Image: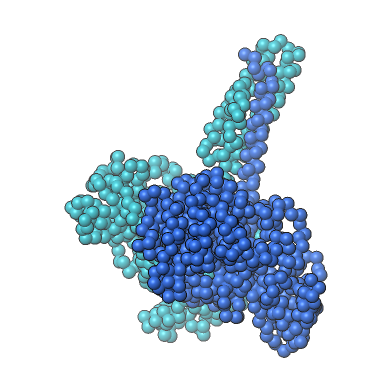
Amino acid sequence: QKYYHYVHLFLQVEQVRLLDRFSNKSIHGTLYLTATHLIFVESNSNNSILHHHIASVEKLSLTTSGCPLVIQCRNFRVVNFVIQRERDCHDVYSSLLRLLRPVCYDELYAFSYNPKQNDQQREEGWQLIDLGAEFERMGVPCDQWQLTDVNRDYKVCETYPRDLYVPVTASKPIIVGSSKFRSKGRFPVLTYFYQEKKAAVCRCSQPLSGFSARCLEDESMLQAISKANHNSRFLYVMDTRPKLNALANRAAGKGYENEDNYSNIRFQFVGIENIHVMRSSLQKLLEVTGTRSLSMSDYLVGLESSGWLRHIKAVVDAAVFLTRAVTVEGASVLVHCSDGWDRTAQVCALGALLMDPYYRTIKGFMVLIEKDWISFGHKFADRCDQLDGDPKEVSPIFTQFLECVWQLTEQFPQAFEFSEWFLLQIHEHVHSCQYGNFLGNNQRQREELQLRERTHSLWAFLMSEKQNHLNPFYSPAYSEAHPVLEPSTLPYHFKFWRSMYHQFDRSMHPRQSILKTILTLKENSRKAESTLQALESVSTLLHIVIFLSFKLDTHQPQRSARTVEGSSGTESRKQSYGELEGTYNSDLVKEEPAVVSLEFGVARMTC
Amino acid sequence: MSAEIMEFAELIKTPRVDGVVLHRPFMPTVEGTLCLTGHHLILSSRQDNTEELWLLHSNIDSIEKRFVGSLGHITVKCKDLRMIQLEITGMEECLNIASSIEALSTLDSVSLMYPFFYRPMFEVIEDGWNSFLPQNAFKDLESMTDEWRLSEVNKDFSLCPSYPPLVAVPKDVDDETLKKVATFRHGGRFPVLSYYHKKNGMVMMRAGQPLTGTNGRRCKEDEKLINATLRPGKRGYIIDTRAINVAQQAKARGGGFELEANYPQWRRIHKAIERYNVLQESLIKLVEACNDQSHSMDRWLSKLEASNWQTNVKEILTTACLAAQCIDREGASVLVHGTEGTDSTLQVTSLAQIILDPGCRTIKGFQSLVEREWLQAGHPFQQRCAQSAFSNSKPRYEAPVFLLFLDCVWQILRQFPCSFEFNESFLVLLFEHAYASQFGTFLGNSAAERARLCLPEKTVSLWSWVNRPQELERLTNPLYEPNSLVIWPSVAPQSLLLWEGVFLRWNRSSKCLDEAYEEMVHIIEYNKELQTKVNSLRRQLAQLETEDPLLHTP
């Protein structure tokens, strides 16, 4: 990736020091600034940082060794440069400020990124995930649930996708009426269908109930959802906010469902904090973990006071509640928060992941993100600060979701097809703006941006390097035996996710990775299997050749027959050996110290 | 012996009760007959497929009893941190059982301990009592250097009661000098060789604190002894495992530290590793936090912090890294001591060896390390491990010093999962046996006490049992690949984890993790199998080709 060879260079600064943020180590190199990347090149390696990843740049006051520049990235990388001359430092600083705050979507990397694919390949990449097929997989449409075209033109709710699934008994007037009674028009729709119990997980935003308002259509809507499930007489309504927040919303004409107005609902608060609390929580966490020579006590106190793990636990607790209601009680559940695109997305997606082993596969996890996050309008652009927007809209909601999944993989090491590397990759690209998937805030906006025509899909890229993301301990049999995961949410099961928040601080990680070792071994075994197969067929062939040549020897004139039979045997053998040497002697494989080197006709024992 | 058996009989008020219900976390309830023997609490359902419970009385840390009507509940809390519940009908029987357990689990006399009664049900292939003789360890040293000698000055344990009969000292220092030095060091623990770093010839020594007292007593022989370990023109480091103020205070009680003026070639560094009574508090608090079933994250984290356990782990590891760094990176020799030289000193010297010496990371090498640096070096196991985290009595000499060492090893193992021949189970096993065991290895407080108790003659060594193929297989790390390098662990708080395998062992279902481990073993074995097949097939093919004359004719 030598961008600096062919991309227009904005700046080049020699003699820059890159400091390790936890030790006193530093390396010298050259800093290059291009239109898309900041690249630091030293003798044997180079680091490049995508401008989109940069969250903040800070120029500190001049020291004797130079001018320090601190760059904080959204993927939790923190880079400390020391630039010798203050002027150079200022140039880098001001150029970065200009470059890293794109004001319109067209400036994002995704629109210029070209992975050397043709249009057809790009098109195929976008077709990889098909949400219609996903609902079919769940068993929808069915006798109780149907596809509605009410939002075909984004008229009823512009932050929802076009295709929505609702109870068959919910007529258009009911839908439209309900949508008018819900914040941002986000009326209750199906997001997951638990076929075994015919129980539905639905999502929406808060009702505009204020202190006493009610809406008959909305009440009918909930009634319809409830009635669509014959296994339960009631419908759970999960308000994922703390009760206090919901109460406060009533003053603004919003609020929560009054149990007296809705027949057969069971209302429940689950207490996940809002985006602002989450944002400052992460900030505190990063402040603590970024401290040099951090003491154990300060670390644990900081971990506690940041509240981060408490918030993670709250999300998992909510998902566990949802899962139990659906899989054990067989009840349908309607989940909402305020607007129904943050906490609601977290809880619905995590709940589905606990209920359905499909979402724990690589492909299934992509589908899940596509469904509950992208299509239902989690505001990626705002939350991930893709454009220079309102800093109060930025919040690590999706990061929290990925972390919840990671916490589950720690409890269930065999239940997931993917490893944490997959989660880290996704996190990386949610912020990189290199692929189109996460750009914008909702589907309508994405269509306007013509992302499918103008950008590439991350899913296709991740699929193409699936091997790197596999969890070697994954067992489909485990999932078959445990389709529904029942995690413990006792506090000590939640750990600090070092691989995420210290991703780039190599000194903090184990120096040997079990994951990497086992993945390599598995890959070896796969290769050895095919080698074995090839060797076996060669061996059979060799036996035939020997057998035939013996026959030919006795019955036919030697020469002519030999050329025919012998040479074809030779050919095939040479070919397969050639191939084998190539794969087998790759550095991954540990072979016995060269026992034989095979070439046709010349077998030498070399030890 | 019969008198002893009589004694047990007196303590057992009710030898058996039927219809007792046993509750264990994450295991099915078992109903059966409870039997008390001199050394065991046994619960058997007399059905084929349910596991019986065999619990050593010496493993019981404390019990609690309460009644609901006439139904008695006894909670048995073990030294290995397990908690089980027994439901016994009938108040009198329950009280009898409870008081019997209490009496049997707090026997004072060492000679009544189970190891003296235990007869192995397995064939001893190699007697563990002879596996790690100091003479043999010294032979290894002799192959590397001739600067050291084995001294028999402590042959009858008179010079230093906590040292073994044989110790390695600088060749140029005679026994008379040693005798003088012994009077200047706490507990007679004069500086002895702990580790020789083959790579650069640097050494690590350990000792008790110097008895300088308030008036700054000095001892020329002591100075001579430790200077004898320095190469010409080289400096050494003295690592005092106490904070400077603690070391200062020790002067008032006759202890102290080496003054720069008297040891000009040595630089003293103070590190703050906690003393044993503080560590015991730490363990109690940690285990209490782990058993808190409240769902509050804040409470858990603040309790974890307040226990200071992880802080202790970090301090000990950091000090060990410092010692290793002085030796390997600075090319300097090191003397380690705290107060007595039997606790924090040994944590540091043994961990430094794990870091520096690949040999210590093998199963045998680690056993040898425990034998050398803990058992022979006089760590008072019996005192330290008399009670564990659930004890109600006020701790006297109890402390999880060895457990902290194992925890630190586990931390390094986590960071270098392929560099150790043993796995976590081996460390857990050592923890269990240090606290309660059928083997004699961890009985007594010193080599002298062990000799007096005639342990090699009267008890079986833990190593005799461990070093059999079937046990070794269970304790071997399938990922192991010898790594000859020095391994530097990260001591950042983010890199140090709570040792769940010990502290949450009974609070979580380990099924998923065990199955994943099995899967890992399977993957590795399958890979080996395939490689063997491929290699043998290649050899066969080569054979075929050389044997077939037709293929050789042009």
Residue A411 pos. (x, y %): 56, 63
Q: Nearer the viewer, residue B128 or B514?
A: B128
- Residue A280 image-quadrant placement: bottom left
Q: Nearer the viewer, residue A165 or B401?
A: B401
Residue A82 pos. (x, y %): 26, 53
B10 above or below A488? below
- Residue A294 image-quadrant placement: bottom left
Q: Report the side of B114 relative to B481 (left or right).
A: right
B277 above or below B450? below
Q: Residue at x 76, y 87 (%)?
A: B92
Q: Nearer the viewer, residue A430 or A168?
A: A430
Q: Residue at x 41, y 49 (%)?
A: B231
Q: Residue at x 33, y 42 (%)?
A: A43
- The outermost residue toward the left is A87
Q: Report the side of B142 relative to B251 (left or right).
A: right
Q: Report the side of B210 relative to B37 (left or right).
A: left
Residue A194 pos. (x, y %): 59, 65
Task: From the image, state the color of chain A.
Answer: cyan
Structure colour scheme: by chain
Q: Quadrant of the N terminus of chain A?
A: top left
Q: Residue at x 28, y 54 (%)?
A: A81
Question: Visible in this render: residue A237?
Answer: no
Q: Which chain is blue?
A: B
